[in-house]
Amino acid sequence: MQQITNKNEQKKLTIIHSEEYNPWYNLALEEHLFNNLDEDEIILYLWQNDQTVVIGRNQNSWQECRCSLLEEENGGFLARRLSGGGAVYHDLGNLNFTFILKKKNYDVEKQLEVILKAVRNLGIKAEFTGRNDITVSGKKISGNAFYHSQGTAYHHGTILFDTDIESLVKYLQVSQEKIKSKGIKSVRSRVVNLKEIKEDLTLNSIKEEIEKSFLETYNASLKKVEKIETKPSQIKELEELYNKYSSWDWRYGKTPDFDIYFEKRFEWGGVELGIALIDGKIDQVRVYSDAGNAELFVKINEILKGEKLNKERIISSLDKLKAVGNQDIINDLKQWLAKRDI
């Protein structure tokens, strides 16, 4: 781990490399760093997972991944992250990055510039497109997702360097509706490895350019390099987080037998709504989505549970979520449910 002080703003920049390839550990470390961020600190965290499918916070594991094939037959990992967005495949041909910082320092364009500048410095023309993708000649090399909580935020993403595309296609289950909505024929036709574009590229060269771009973008100079000791209390927290990320309940969750099930794809992402009833009230509700706002869909689950099965009351309940943001998404959901037979 390197700690670097910004010469102008006195920001403490920290660069961290994980030496583990286990996704449950790497996601636990990511949340641990998030929970223990200093007020003036900006972290760049670089990490890799081996043979892993990582799903978004609100996604249905079985709908997004061929779970038995991945875990039981081939010894891979299924992981669920805190952020929203869609499912991604990771192997050692993929590099993950995370920016962890306070909301006052949070700037998506600046964070993306770190990655874009690094890739361009390698001689590859990349651009940010769509909701959360970095592309080269229209093909995806990086997907990005975001998480905010109590004044702190993280922005993380993938970089396809030399990923096994056949495994990506084999393990991910992409709905035909999603493929159709994006105007593409297959997952394979939509992604590309950087090594396909520049054959002599190495993983170390990508890491070095990202670190260099990070320092240049935040206008920092290397002032000191020191080992960062982990306190015993922090080790305990990291163990507890690992137990969470590796648990069945977190990765798969308990899916009840739904009495009502609807699904719909919008411009901002897909939604699956499942409702289980007892005595005319909503006993269990699951809202699955690959939309970017993870917190919004967690809150929808919370506010609908215990509500009477009444269309008007369900729709009006969504108005309680205005403070969470994304009013356009809420309006779309209300209009959609108003047309359903509930």
Image (spheres, grey):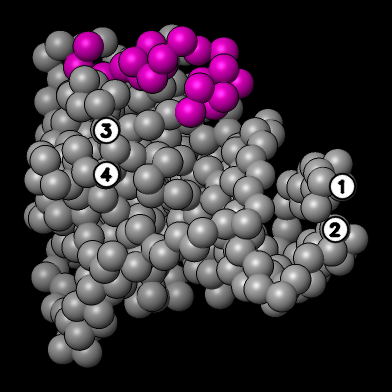
Q: Nearer the viewer, mark 3 or mark 4?
A: 4
Q: Earlier in the sequence, mark 4 or mark 1?
A: 4
Residue 311 numbered tag: 2
Q: Quadrant for residue 135, please give it.
A: top left
Horizontal arrangement in the rendering, residue 326 relative to residue 151 (left or right): right
Q: Is residue 228 above or below residue 237?
A: above
Distance (Cα) linking label 4 and label 1: 35 Å
Q: Do callouts 3 and 4 mark residues in contact (Cβ within 8 Å)?
A: no
Q: Amino acid at mark 1?
A: Ala
Distance (Cα) linking label 2 and label 1: 7 Å
Distance (Cα) linking label 3 and label 4: 8 Å
Mark 3 lies on residue: 171
Nearer the observer, 190 or 283: 283
Nearer the observer, 272 or 101: 272
Q: Residue furthest front?
A: 279
Say which element carries label 2.
Answer: helix
| The residue stretch that appears in magenta | 175-196
